[in-house]
Image (spheres, rainbow, N blue to C red):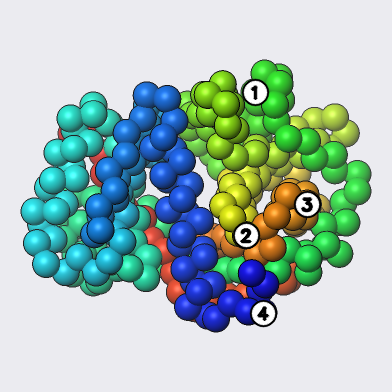
């Protein structure tokens, strides 16, 4: 599959399918659970971050919205989940669903994040930026802890949120298959930036792109986006995908990512 051969709709599906495949992978980690139906999917993992507990629509769920939401909430309660995200994209993203989620107490967390895609080979030039930033795949305990701390500093999240990623990575690796690769960027031997790459078939998604506040504005984000993707290209993926924050949008456009004119949103449920 080449980038040129993909239609706009297939590129949109490539982004969404990479996100959904990531969630399925989370739902297969040790101690996790996963429900997959033709209309709605849910994944639960015991790692303390709402990224590891979520529901997403696989079709337009305009009918029985309230009862579907109630069923999903009940399922997560039965797991003892303290929170989870409900994700919407081009499938199942009706305005009625959004209104119903809000009525059920969900809190908007990300709204209308642009879906973007690029051919990985076209990122090669940009990947050569900031050669003084050393990027490693976090594998040792020390590297995983440095990834965690840089992630939490970059996103302003509690330590538990970063620990969830590193613990899940350890769990998947111990089970025989590393679920994704965590990348940590070092400047002058200090961990200053993070990203994560999840590959499925010909598509590689890049997530968790962040730079600690003291190191921003130096091009580290560009390097953390492109270099791990070019590395992933050696194994197979040809297309890079992501969903963008407002802060990162202009950077991704400069790097060569195309805006697919479709969005993803997520809403947070918190147990009372």
Q: Are marks 1 and 4 in contact (CB under 8 Å)?
A: no
Task: Indicate which disc, 1 or 3, sits on the residue closer to the N terminus.
Answer: 1
- Residue placed under numbered mark 1 in the picture: 145
Label 4: how many Cα within 10 Å (few below 14, some 14–19, many 20+) = few
**Which residue occupies 44% across, 30% down?**
29
> Is residue 217 in view from this perspective?
no
> Could you give the CA–CA distance between mark 1 and mark 4, rounded to whole angstroms?
39 Å
**Which residue occupies 85% across, 43% down?**
133
Task: Indicate which disc, 3 or 2, sits on the residue closer to the N terminus.
Answer: 2
> Could you give the CA–CA distance between mark 1 and mark 3, rounded to whole angstroms?
27 Å
Question: Is label 1 or label 4 in front?
Answer: 4
Mark drawn on residue 4: 4
Mark 4 falls on what kind of element?
Answer: loop
Task: Indicate which disc, 2 or 4, sits on the residue closer to the N terminus.
Answer: 4
Label 3: how many Cα within 10 Å (few below 14, some 14–19, many 20+) = few
Q: Which quadrant of the rendered structure holds the N terminus?
A: bottom right
Measured from the top left, where is residue 246 in percent x and y?
54, 64
Q: Do the residues labelled 1 and 2 touch (CB within 8 Å)?
A: no
> Is residue 206 in view from this perspective?
yes
Task: Indicate which disc, 1 or 2, sits on the residue closer to the N terminus.
Answer: 1
Front position in the image: 253 or 22? 22
- Residue placed under numbered mark 2 in the picture: 202
In the displayed structure, 78 sits above or below 174; it is below
**Which residue occupies 62% across, 60% down?**
202
Q: In this view, does 231 lie to the left or right of 263?
A: right
> Could you give the CA–CA distance between mark 3 and mark 4, rounded to whole angstroms?
19 Å
Q: Are marks 1 and 3 in contact (CB under 8 Å)?
A: no
Measured from the top left, where is residue 228 in percent x and y?
74, 48
Task: Indicate which disc, 1 or 4, sits on the residue closer to the N terminus.
Answer: 4
Measured from the top left, where is residue 256 in percent x and y?
72, 71
In the displayed structure, 33 sits above or below 207; it is above
Measured from the top left, where is residue 134 in percent x and y?
85, 39
């Amino acid at each position: 599959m080449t980038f040129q051969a993909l239609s706009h709709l297939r590129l949109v599906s490539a982004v969404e399918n990479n996100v959904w495949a990531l969630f399925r992978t989370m739902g297969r980690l040790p101690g996790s659970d996963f429900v997959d139906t033709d209309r709605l999917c849910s994944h639960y993992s015991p790692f303390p971050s709402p990224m590891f507990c979520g529901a997403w629509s696989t079709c337009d769920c305009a009918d029985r919205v309230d009862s579907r939401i109630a069923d999903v909430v009940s399922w997560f309660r039965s797991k003892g989940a303290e929170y989870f995200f409900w994700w919407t994209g081009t499938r199942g993203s009706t305005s009625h669903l959004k209104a119903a989620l809000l009525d059920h107490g969900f809190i908007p967390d990300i709204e209308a994040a642009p879906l973007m895609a690029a051919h990985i080979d076209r990122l090669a030039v940009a990947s050569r930026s900031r050669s003084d930033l050393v990027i490693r795949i976090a594998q040792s305990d020390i590297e995983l802890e440095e990834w965690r701390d840089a992630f939490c500093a970059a996103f302003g999240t509690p330590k538990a949120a970063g620990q969830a990623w590193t613990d899940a990575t350890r769990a998947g690796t111990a089970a025989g298959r590393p679920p994704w690769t965590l990348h940590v960027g070092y400047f002058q031997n200090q961990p200053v930036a993070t990203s994560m790459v999840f590959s499925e078939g010909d598509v590689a998604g890049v997530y968790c792109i962040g730079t600690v506040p003291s190191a921003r504005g130096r091009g580290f984000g560009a390097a953390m986006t492109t270099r791990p993707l070019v590395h992933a290209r050696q194994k197979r993926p040809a297309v890079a995908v992501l969903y963008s924050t407002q802060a990162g949008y202009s950077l991704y456009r400069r790097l060569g990512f195309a805006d697919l004119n479709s969005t993803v949103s997520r809403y947070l449920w918190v147990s009372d």
